[in-house]
Amino acid sequence: MIDQKSISLRAWAELTLLGLIWGASFLAIRVALDELPVLTTVLHRTFWAMLVLWAVVLARRLPIPRSPRVWGAFLVMGLLNNAIPFGLMAWGQLYIESGLAAILNAATAIFGVTLAAIVFADERLTPARLLGVGLGFFGVVTTIGLGNLAQLDLRSGAQLAVLGGAFSYACASVWARLNLGGLPPLVAAAGMLTGSTLLIVPATLLVDGVPSLALAPATWAAIGYYGLVATAGAYLLYYRILAMAGSGNLMLVTLLIPPVAIALGAAVRAEALPPRAFTGFALLALGLLILNIASRHRRD
């Protein structure tokens, strides 16, 4: 078990690196969407990452599960942690800025703490955690704007889609704890990506048709980045940090992602966010910091 109070300099460096990798993935996905439809974009992400992770699993000679129950759990996990959130967030990025999508994605941690408190007896909402969750939700509402929530246009719909993806990530974390405990993390990640790929292939063929490989170099570069680096590579890094620093400290990566996405979106695509987005992120960040401090009083 990891003591939440201890985190090494190496863990901080790798945590920062993970934040940079995931922050840049929002720009890469947006670049791919210039040429690819949404489901094809998602299929490229899960398929190539799946191949890389299975290669690592085989190279390390990790045991591959044979139980149909486990593979069924992989299928549900792939739906909740990949197919639904990747699809919703990619569609959302067609109509909102990359930085805004990254800010709303940070609500994953808020949703995760709330769902865990509902499902697990050992994850109750203490006063400090309740304060953090409340600030986080207030930050989300501020980012979107109450007036925009009442409008039924593509921009407000896109923001809600990204939030839907964040909520799906939170559901996936609960599902993983209930059904995938005891498995090597890399095997679970490879199995999850296999499940999501099996779901996305028929959906892509039905909606987008057979994917073309005759793509612009910039599109292939974007696919290579978000599929190999920001998905397969990020999973490998994620589990290293989890082992070194614990889940409470790992939550801090959500604070690093939006600034990276905002800066890259502004520099590469001239994206500009409304002032309320920065105010909302500040409130969301404060809520996440409070949740992190509260987690230091527990053992992972």
Image: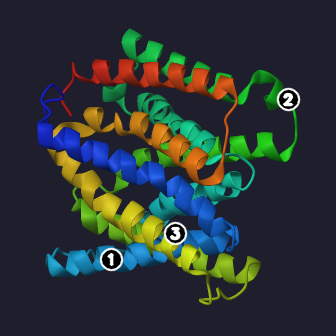
Judge whether 299 appears above or below 188 on screen: above
Q: Earlier in the sequence, mark 2 or mark 3?
A: 2
**Residue drawn at (59%, 58%) of the image:** 84
Judge whether 114 appears above or below 86 on screen: above
To which residue does mark 3 refer? 222
| Three-letter amino acid code at the position of disc 1 | Val
Return the x and y of residue 244 as percentages of the image width and height.
15, 43
Return the x and y of residue 204 as percentages of the image width and height.
67, 78
Viewer can see residue 70: no
The residues bearing labels 1 and 3 have C-alpha atoms spaced at a distance of: 17 Å
- Which corner quadrant holds the N terminus? top left
Q: Nearer the viewer, residue 196 or 20?
A: 20
| Three-letter amino acid code at the position of disc 3 | Ala
Q: Considering the numbered disc 1 on the image, is that residue within a helix, a strand or a loop?
A: helix
Local crowd at mark 1 within 10 Å, few (<14), some, or many (≥20)?
A: some
Q: Earlier in the sequence, mark 1 or mark 3?
A: 1
To which residue does mark 2 refer? 150
The residues bearing labels 2 and 3 have C-alpha atoms spaced at a distance of: 35 Å
Q: Residue furthest top?
A: 127
To which residue does mark 1 refer? 52
Q: Considering the numbered disc 2 on the image, is that residue within a helix, a strand or a loop?
A: loop
